[in-house]
Amino acid sequence: MSNNKRIVKAALAARSIEEAEIVQQSIARALGTRYQRPLGDKGNNQGILTGSGASYDHKSLEVVTNMQDAVIELYALQTYGTRGAVPFNTPHEAASTLLSELGEKERAELATVTIDKAAVGSDKKRITLVMRDHGCGIVVNEVPRTIFQVGAGHKNGVNWQQGTYGLGGALTYLNAGAVVVVTRRHPDLLEPDDEDRISIAVVQRERVHTTANAYYLVTEPWIEGDPTTWAKAVPFSVPSADYPDFEPGTHVALIAYDTEGLGRRSGDEKSFDTILNTRLFRPVLPIKYRNNITRTDRAETLNGLERRLNDNPGEAGTEGLDTLPFNHDGTTYHLPIRFRLFTKAGSRGQRRNFVAHGHALLLTSNGQVHSHWSPQDFKLKTKLNKLYDRVLVIVASDQLPIEIRTELFTADRAQLVRSAVAIRLEKEIAAFLNDWPALRDANSALIREAISGDNNDRPTIAVAEQIARAFKAKGFSLGGIGMGGSGGGRKPPEPTRPEDLYHDPTHFEGPKSIEAQVGKVKGAYFKLNATDGFITQRAFLQVTCDHPDIGPAEITVGELRSGRVRVSIAVPDNADLGTYNLDVEIPEWTRTSGGLGPKFEWSTKIDIIEEAPSKPTGPKGGRDPGTSGPGDGGLVALIWKSEADDGVENWSAATVGEIEMVPAKDLAGQRSEYAPLAKVDGEIPTIVLNRTYSPLKNYIQARAAELTDESKEKSRERYAVGVGVALLVLDQDARDAQKAGNPHDEATMEVGRRAAARAVLSVMPEADRLVKELES
């Protein structure tokens, strides 16, 4: 076996740092010297390789998208000859056209990922990721400015590739103990003066003073200040004839790659397959994947979470589609939004069985996640506080021009840039979700479940009054969040009962008037007593507005669900103020029995205003609970639950409780003692306390011998007053912090709740003693 063949073979087989070092030494001996060239042509490159604080598990997908780009580039250049002649505008358009004759498994064979152990006995958190594509490959003198470049300069302006504005796979190198690259340019793409050669390079790090910088060996001296030396300083290469078994394409091994769980079994929320499917939601090409740590005999085809969700549809009502009209610089773009609701944690259809850890909302470009919200982000940014651990929302940004998208997202596709347009987009998304009737219904159903089924029949309204008075005495305002408002159409109508919906509808109505603020999206809600799917499947809802700046592009129509349909209007920043008409029409449609059904029409006045009117602060407390709620300290409710009850999720014996903002009518419907609130139009701060909170339970048990059953309940009520006030204070502080842009994380909030509960319990023995003396 020739020395060249041994080097290539060893490079392809390297899985450990020691094996990579052997390859590096072999290259140095073959060159007869040891010239180093830094990655990215920056001698001090640790800083530029660090990038943002995004997960290295997520960054590993940059190498996957590089493989997909290489495959598309091969087929594009074979077909069109030059990059400039390629006519496609998106990667998906290019892939679907160029590879149309290949089946899914054939396409997956073109780009593969294998996970191996990084060393004997190594665990699943330090692995070796091997990426192999059968794409264009790289000629030896192009390696430094392509795969070893930090940033994708050679892809700038090439919109049919995914790396057109990313930082590239080089960001992963800092997280690996070593990186081995073997690449061969496809013979069809070689220039007349190019040789058919296999390039081999090993990226290692060398500490210089305070930084550990990445480098690889080259054939000639490389001098940073003398660019004339760069052209000859290329990686080691051998003629392809010395190792003909290596077909054109590129092999990249990220050796001893530290992860949070990429090596776990397939289906785990932190495993490579789940992360790839989630973050490459709609991949350009499928990937062939094998995990040799957990199951060597199984090869999988990974084709994105969109495909998986489509193949495994949820139950009726758990999915929805709508379009957000987003106006930027005078042009309105339509951003499709999709949601999927999963079952509660611990059940078969839970979110973690489908979606990667920490993902509740995905903001995608070209089918790839470029920013996401964690479940905690979702809880803080929206009013849908019960859905954060059950929902997945996907917002596709592809309708925005690529120039806008490059300004929206960080180059490593980790998050939104905190620019004015990005902040406004996030706010518009949150508002759009808050007012989505299907999501509001689901959130309300979970709230009703959370406040039902109390395992104690003892009334709580008197204790709630005490809490409200104590809270108000400390200088805080109370009364909930108003839900009413001026102008019809602001609040989504209640769902229509299924028995009142018909295949052939008879009634259509909407709000008489609405108010819309310039520069924002306004939702108007209309009712049609038709079954779901009537709109779009059998009839169309057409909307026009006589405002000169609000045309068809500024208006989108959502799904008909439970007798309601939302019309969204994007009001441009420079729209004229005044009152205009919003005309809605459902043209004649075909009845189920044949013949034409009637045309439905409705006209709504739309007032374009500069600023939205201030929201009502909610109902105020009074002495008459029949008109304003419990007590004269404001509106508060108290409910006891335990971690074993239905309606509470993620509770344990260490859970103190939580504050729920419950619509007054729901509270009245679930709890008879709060029935007088049925006519109150607002949300009531509802304190839900854990009756079996371990320290409370231990306290009651320790004093069981000296307390009667009535005394035990009185002790719990005194505990409820103290802890209830503390939870209200913590909740208000959290809301203020959220408005100020400095939200508290859930772990910090839970520490505060537990500290408050323990503080109350610490003074209760003396309080119980005094009460007992007074009673005697």
Image (tube, helix red, strand yellow):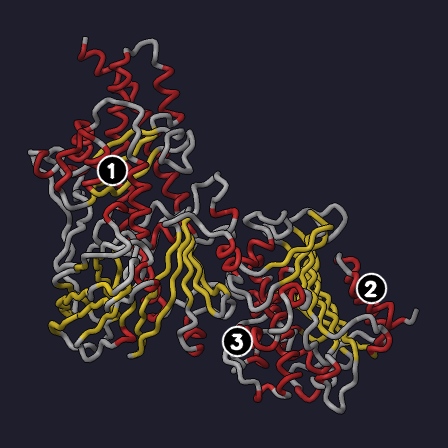
**Few, some or many residues within 10 Å of mark 2 (<14, 14–19, 20+):** some
Q: Visible in this render: residue 431?
A: no
Q: In the orientation shown, which residue stands out farthest toward the bottom? A: 192
Q: Residue furthest right?
A: 1
Residue at numbered disc 3: 93
Which mark identifies residue 181? none
Q: CA distance from mark 2 to mark 1?
A: 66 Å
Q: Is residue 275 left or right of 620 when viewed as pictured?
A: right
Position in image of residue 42 (x %, y %): 62, 75
The N terminus lies in quadrant: bottom right
Q: Residue at 30% across / 58% down in the picture? A: 592
Q: Which of labels 1 and 3 is toward the front? A: 3
Q: Tell me where residue 180 sits by quadrant.
A: bottom right
Q: Which residue occupies 68% across, 53% down?
A: 291
Q: Nearer the viewer, mark 3 or mark 2?
A: 3
Residue corresponding to mark 2: 10
Q: Where 461 sits versus 399, above or below?
A: above
Q: Nearer the viewer, residue 596 or 681?
A: 596
Q: Amino acid at mark 1?
A: Thr
Q: Earlier in the sequence, mark 1 or mark 3?
A: 3
Image location of residue 272, percent across then percent down? 60, 55
396 to the left or right of 477:
right
Whether residues under marks 2 and 1 lie with C-beta atoms below 8 angstroms apart, the answer is no
Q: Is residue 652 left or right of residue 253?
A: left
Quick check: 103 above or below 387?
below
The secondary structure type at the circle numbered 1 is strand
Q: Residues within 10 Å of mark 3 (few under 14, many from 20)?
A: few
Label 3 and label 2: CA atoms lie apart by 38 Å
State the residue at coordinates (15%, 46%). Answer: 681
Query: Where does label 1 land, which residue?
Result: 686
Give the spatial CA distance, label 1 vs label 3: 52 Å
Question: For numbered disc 3, what is the local secondary structure?
Answer: helix
